[in-house]
Image: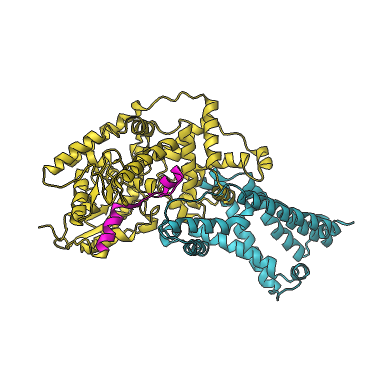
Amino acid sequence: MTPADSALGEFEIRVKELEALAPPVTLSDEERVSRAKQVMLEKLDSHTAMDLETCVHCGMCAEACHFYESTQDPKYTPIHKAYLLRKVYRRELSPVRLLNKLFLREITAKQLDEWTELAFNSCTECGRCDLMCPMGIHISRAISITREALGAAGAAPAELRAVEYEQVTKDTLFGVGAKQLTQTIEELRARGLDIPLDKPTAEVMLLTTAVDLVLYKETLAATAKILNALKVSWTLQSCGFEAANFGMLSGHLRGQALESQRIIDAAIACGAKIVITPECGHAYPALRWEAANDLGKPLPFDVMAISEYVGREIRSGRLKVHPIDGPRKVTYQDPCKIGRHGGVFEEPRAALKALGVELHEMESHGKTQYCCGGGGGVFLIDAAEPLRRRTFEIKQHQVDETGADALVTTCNTCRLSLSSAGRKVNWNTPIESLVELVAANLADTP
Amino acid sequence: MTLLDFARGPGFFIAFVILIAGILWRTSGLLLLRWRRNLAKPRIPGPVAAVAGGLRAVAMRSVPPHELEKNITFQHFTGYAWHIGWFVTFLFLGAHLPFIRSILGFGWPNLPNGILLVITAITLGILLTLYIRRLFHPVLRVITDMDDHISVLLTILPLVTGIAAFAHWSAFGLRYEKVLAIHLLSVEALMVWLPFGKIFHCVTGLLTRFRLGATFIRRGVRA
């Protein structure tokens, strides 16, 4: 067993212990239903309402969903996962609600519990269904609201509630906080790497994640190497370094805003013009697309995913890399939250091109890419493990079809999910970090 | 007043008023709900990009990428086929054109009846096939509700009664005038139901496509 396998194994054990750490839900059934409805009605806007009115029940979205495709279980049909939201909308807000009330009953606490499996365990909010719907319904948005309603009703999975509670109350994740950040930085500095921490002013503020500090320290080291090669003024800030946002993943709206606010405060304090999110899929939309709306004002800095930043710098000629040694066939996994939800498709590919690798695309790549199966917090949900294994088969097949020697990605959840599922079936295709690949081949590096 | 007189006169007028008032009520109700201002900085900024992204989704959503389309080929093509067949029958049947001219003040040449009969029969066949599929397909069974049954029935009825009127069938002892009146009433039932059921997607379907396209292009994704 390699050290990486061992670290991953230890991390998986820690994940399995999460369920017991979740705060208890003390709400009555009536309160839970009331809170869920309140969130739904607050979040429903003209756009989502029109989406819900326009569904023709064609069921085509099922064919875009990896959970349905791998199990053929109809309950995983994406629009069905938004059924409770649709029901509340049709009863309470629809222009024809008087008619609808004749046929639709109130949602119940039992239904909220049933929908935990559908909106959380079997939905990574990957958004592939959004591209399939012939009516152009933003299905993932409707499921996201459903998650928020379930979160308010205490119906989010215990693992996500536990991690979210820890992040809000202790500002740590998996026991990792500012102290462990400092330790890791000291460790990397001891290797001769210059990693600025808590600089009073910097043009670029880098974020990292507890997962990187525990499992993928080399990704942080590689990112530092790249930023140093670019000679930009950058820093990590111990009071706002955590990119992961478990408020967003668990549907806890106040937590989501609080976790973004910590980053924003830190960035403002050091005068950063750019905040870079690490190779962490959901961290990007949490800050890039959601934070300004959560807090009610535009962000005073640009947000870039590290792959986007690196690709941009390579394309501009400011970051120089040399081609890797020898021929190498790779395929690229677009993380859903950075690609389909973020529009970052070209920059990672520009980096791979500069590295001179042969890129063999999967049949579904770019905006139609299949999710790794663990996004949206699903990797942490123990009850979703059998489902993740099934969805992995799709990804495994797609990767194997390319004949690539390695899979490159730019998301630690993709790496975790695919490594974990792959290990169980002895799938040995290496899964590599784009940033690490770039850092290992910087032109200025001897 | 005969049934035919009613269907041609007050029946049609009532259905038309409900159709228009219902569409206006439901559409304005949707548009008057809260609109959220998106405060995140767009990757591709500006109203021109948003409109272009929206229009692209309106046009291209009918042609999904191969890796998505390959799983829905049957439903995809049959879905568009019956819609086209239904509207071709409505717009190009010789017997319909005087009515259309009386409403619009102008018309267009009709298609030969033989061709339209074939198109109508195919359309009806597809609709019935899709409905039977809806009753047995596991996914469709989960998401089907009463609206689907009513909407399918009211979409099929004008075709069935239309064929009966066209062929001058006189089943159950009904005279041609009665059959024609039933045909008109079936269309009026569809008009009355349209603003309240899922057939309303004919009003909002392009808008939702447009909004999705405009939303995604802000993020740099051509949806």
Residue B99, percent from left and from top: 77, 67
In the rendered image, what is the letter of the chain coloured yellow?
A
- Which quadrant of the structure image shows residue A365? bottom left
Magenta segment, which residues? A288-315
The quarter of the rendered structure image containing the N terminus of chain B is bottom right
Q: Main secondary structure of the magenta part?
A: helix
Residue A156, percent from left and from top: 43, 34
Residue B115, percent from left and from top: 66, 72
- Seen at 64% across and 67% down, the residue is B119
Instruction: Name the side, left or right, on which B129 lies relative to A379.
Output: right
Q: Is there any visible trace of residue B71 in the rendered image?
A: no
Name the residue furthest bottom: B109
The quarter of the rendered structure image containing the C terminus of chain B is bottom left
Instruction: Name the side, left or right, on which A28 lies relative to B16.
Output: left
Q: Is there any visible trace of residue A86 in the rendered image?
A: yes
Name the residue furthest left: A446
Q: What colouring does the structure picture have? A: by chain
Residue B98, percent from left and from top: 77, 70
Q: How many marks?
A: 0
- Within the magenta stretch, is there residue A305? yes
Instruction: Name the side, left or right, on which B100 lies relative to A322.
Output: right
Q: Relative to the observer, which residue lies in front, B111 or A340?
A: A340
In the rendered image, what is the letter of the chain coloured cyan?
B
- Seen at 33% across and 40% down, the residue is A379
